[in-house]
Image: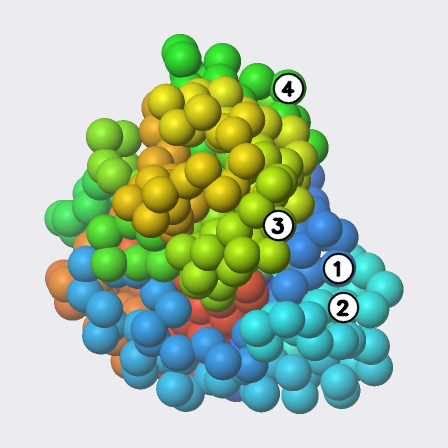
Amino acid sequence: MAEAFDALVVGGGAAGLMCALTAGQRGRRVLVLEHANRVGKKIPMSGGGRCNFTNTGASPANYLSANPHFCKSALARYTPQDFLALVERHGIAWHEKELGQLFCDVSSKLIVKMLLDECAAAGVRIATSCSVEQVQREATGFRVRTTQGAFSAPALVVASGGLSIPSMGASGFGYALARQFGHAVLPTRAGLVPLTLSGKHAERLADLSGVALPVEARCGGASFRNAMLFTHRGVSGPAILQISSFWQPGEDLRLDLLPGIDALDTLQQQQCERPAAELKTVLADLLPRRFAQRLCEHWLQPLQPARPLRQFTLPQLREIAALLTAWPLVASGTEGYRTAEVTLGGVDTDGLSSATLQSKLVPGLYFIGEVVDVSGWLGGYNFQWAWASGHAAGSAL
Ligand SMILES: Cc1cc2nc3c(=O)[nH]c(=O)nc-3n(C[C@H](O)[C@H](O)[C@H](O)COP(=O)(O)OP(=O)(O)OC[C@H]3O[C@@H](n4cnc5c(N)ncnc54)[C@H](O)[C@@H]3O)c2cc1C
């Protein structure tokens, strides 16, 4: 005999918990099935332990999806202000960082506690260390066999997330289930992820690990102005994580090393003010010293950067300015799902209702959060999608 509920939610992450508490508040009997030993494991590690739980400027333009319109409905009906109101009701102190990003003052664990308190108040039952073994469709809904027994419900919500950080419980379960019920799954790949360098590109930049500088990273039509950080394996930092979601191996990736500054103007001004200064010295004043050295050794060597600025012609200054504003970063790949903050691609939105996240193919089946082909930029947008899509499904089932 299967124990009966109104809704079974597979995955107790951000989206699953929001969906469960929303449905529970509407009087639905909800069971969350979580295969890890705790729910919401990604939340404590998010935002450097302070959880960047939303972004005040979140709009559909901050999301990647094969259908950029799909996220509009859910985002409009559960806004960053709605989540902030919940945070404030629980007395969680928060602050705004740059670019509308909201963080907890003390600890991201408070967000997990808030979600669990809301679930408890709404009578949501949560089963941890509970693995789903089989999902069957029946006349009245779904029957789910798990390591803790069988459960049935007219609604089944798949909130099992993407493939990023397998050590935190990530699995391909949601994609397999989507396929089982005839849904298309768009190719997945790691997003918001550090890039790796190899061969001569890695050698040229070896020893720079720990060096950071502001850049504007550009790929295709996308561009992000923020910090970049050299790592042991390649490059990271917010500008790189952002552009990584738009980049694929082999594509042209350029960095403006003096974002917001007219490089040619600056060089000409320096030439007037410090004609005797060597180019390498001037660059070391504009950029981190060790990085400027590498640029001179490997990219500017033909121009003899040890010469005083007065000796440089205008075409040469133009050449240097062009390099500084569009430095080619030849990455070999990404660090992959091991460190990626999100999984791009996923359950094709064509098969889902944008208002409720319900399957158009199988009534009662819902897909929410990261498992869906909607991925946010860095900066609180991914949690906002988890809250909004969870709320949309939780309000409908
Ligand atoms: C290091 C890191 C930092 C991040 N920081 C931020 C941030 O500050 N701000 C932001 O907006 N976003 C951040 N993100 C992204 C954000 O965490 C995710 O977008 C969000 O958690 C997605 O929510 P979700 O509920 O869809 O999936 P998840 O939170 O991944 O939850 C899915 C749940 O399903 C469970 N599960 C998986 N398979 C099964 C199965 N077969 N049976 C049962 N349960 C299963 C998993 O164990 C997990 O608990 C960060 C991500 C990482 C990895």
Q: Which element carries disc 1, helix, strand or loop?
A: loop
In the picture, measured across the screen, residue 72 lies left or right of residue 273, that is left
Mark number, residue 50:
1
Q: Distance between the residues labelled 3 and 2?
A: 47 Å
Q: Which element carries disc 3, helix, strand or loop?
A: loop
CB of mark 4 within 8 Å of CB of mark 2? no
Q: Distance between the residues labelled 4 and 2?
A: 35 Å
Q: Distance between the residues labelled 1 and 4?
A: 30 Å
Identified by mark 2, the residue type is Cys
Say whether disc 4 or disc 2 marks the residue closer to the N-terminus.
2
Q: How crowded is mark 1: few (under 14 residues within 10 Å), some or many (20 or more)?
A: many
Tell me residue 70's x, y (percent): 24, 72
Q: Which element carries disc 4, helix, strand or loop?
A: loop
Mark number, residue 274:
3
Say whether disc 2 or disc 1 marks the residue closer to the N-terminus.
1
Identified by mark 1, the residue type is Arg
Give the mark toward the camera: 4 or 2.
4
CB of mark 2 within 8 Å of CB of mark 1? yes
In which quadrant of the rendered image does the C terminus lie?
bottom left
Identified by mark 4, the residue type is Asp
Residue at 49% across, 63% down: 261
Residue at 45% across, 33% down: 195
Give the mark toward the camera: 4 or 3.
3
Mark number, residue 104:
2
Tell me residue 88's x, y (percent): 75, 85
CB of mark 3 within 8 Å of CB of mark 2? no
Tell me residue 15's x, y (percent): 50, 63
Residue at 69% across, 71% down: 97
Q: Which is more toward the observer, 79 or 57?
A: 57
* Residue carrying label 4: 207
Q: How far apart are marks 4 and 3 (CA)?
A: 30 Å
